[in-house]
Image (cartoon, grey):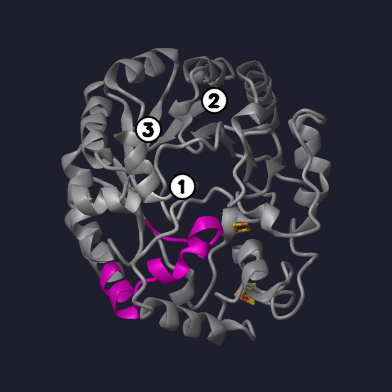
Amino acid sequence: MIPAPLGLLAELTHRCPLGCPYCSNPLELEGRVHEVDAATWARVFREAAALGVLQIHLSGGEPASRRDLEEIVLAAREAALYTNLITSAIGLGAERLARLQAAGLDHVQLSLQDVEAASADRIAGYSGAHERKMAFARSVTELGLALTINAVIHRANIDSVAALVDLAVSLGAGRVEIAHAQYYGWALHNRRALMPTREQVDRAVQDVEDLRARYAQRIVIDMVIPDYYARRPKPCMGGWGRRSLNVTPSGRVLPCHAAPTNPGLEFWSIHDHSLAEIWRESPAFEAFRGTEWMREPCRSCAMREADFGGCRCQAMALTGDAAATDPACELSPMHALLGELAEADSTANLADYAYRGRSLRDRREEEK
Ligand code: SF4
Ligand code: FES
């Protein structure tokens, strides 16, 4: 029996003013002309609710780049879905945020790059971004909307983990995600400039433990552990085709954001099939659902129903075989390679990023 999905990530657009070097969007971005229109999103949200989905995450790119975002939020509300906006805050002032709230927005997830503006703006590839994010966070809480701060952690900001949590508390967030970079897409491309050392990771993990004790009643601190320094893998996406779906700006439906990096998978589109058909029957969702596809050591492992063999996209990226055990697992024959890669990258002394989409110089010239 195929379980019902709980969440749907709607990638409304790949357009974004920022250029974060760890962006989860693909290296080949989908263009504006292919974006799904608001009426089709409304149909998809109704189908998602009928399928059992409870939460819609409106993401991108920057979802505020869509002029019809209010209409899309309203459609999610009319489908009785809890609506979360994942935003960089650029292009989203207090007035527009109030309109989104009136349309039915429930929750805002704001990304921060660092605690200091100079470093944060360098990471984002956009000057003035941090200051706008601070003002935006205040608008979110003044309107009484729930706020989560999301901080992707890597070599340039890992020593600021405690300060980032302090900042999230001072902004009135109810939750903060300390999400160590996951190396797919742009992050894989920039891995040598992003990878922290093992000592930095150990310190950051300990910092989070201490902060959880200190802020027990004030903020929930979630942490995503960096795979390259882990002994066991994460249950990526809560299991392939088990809990959630991603819909790309052009309407392709994916089991996870990096799924297209697995060659040979066939993705169906919302333009050709209902969401229920895609969830239950599409070849991409069937490919790694459950445990039947597993080989040893996963096939006979007691953890196979808990971590589902880790991440298919990481297995593909590092072994060339999406059905292999995720090398983040110490039982994988490739596990030692991960430690060697992390060690080499973390000491690479490389500080220049390949910014998502465009270079920093291009952006500065554009802003003049
Ligand atoms: Fe998980 Fe496979 Fe490792 Fe077992 S062998 S812990 S199922 S990744
Ligand atoms: Fe695709 Fe983990 S990112 S399965």
Cα distance, mark 2 to mark 3? 14 Å
Q: What x and y, as percent, mark residue 357?
A: 50, 47
Sequence-first tag of 2 and 3:
2
Residue 98: image quadrant is top left
Residue 183: in sight, yes or no?
no
Tag 2's secondary structure? loop
Identify residue for label 1.
Answer: 358
Question: Dot 2, crowdedness within 10 Å: few (<14), some or many (≥20)?
Answer: many
In the rendered structure, find residue 81 and report the number of the disc placed on it: 2
Question: Which mark, residue 108?
Answer: 3
The spot of residue 321 in percent (x, y) is 73, 71
Question: Mark 2 or mark 3: which is in front?
Answer: 3
Between the residue at mark 1 and the residue at mark 3, the CA separation in whole angstroms equals 27 Å
Name the quadrant containing residue 152.
bottom left
How many labels sit on residues? 3
Q: Main secondary structure of the magenta part?
A: helix
Identify the residue at image location x=57%, y=77%: 329
**Which label sits in the foreground, 2 or 1?**
1
Name the residue rendered at 67%, 30% in the picture.
34
Q: Which residue is drawn at 74% across and 74% down?
A: 299
On the image, the x and y values in percent for residue 64 come to 44, 27
Extent of the magenta region: 179-204
**Eyeballing the image, is 153 above or below 77?**
below
Image-based side of 343 in relation to 175, left or right: right
The disc placed on residue 57 is none
Mark 1 or mark 3: whose residue is earlier in sequence: 3
- Secondary structure of the residue carrying tag 3 is strand
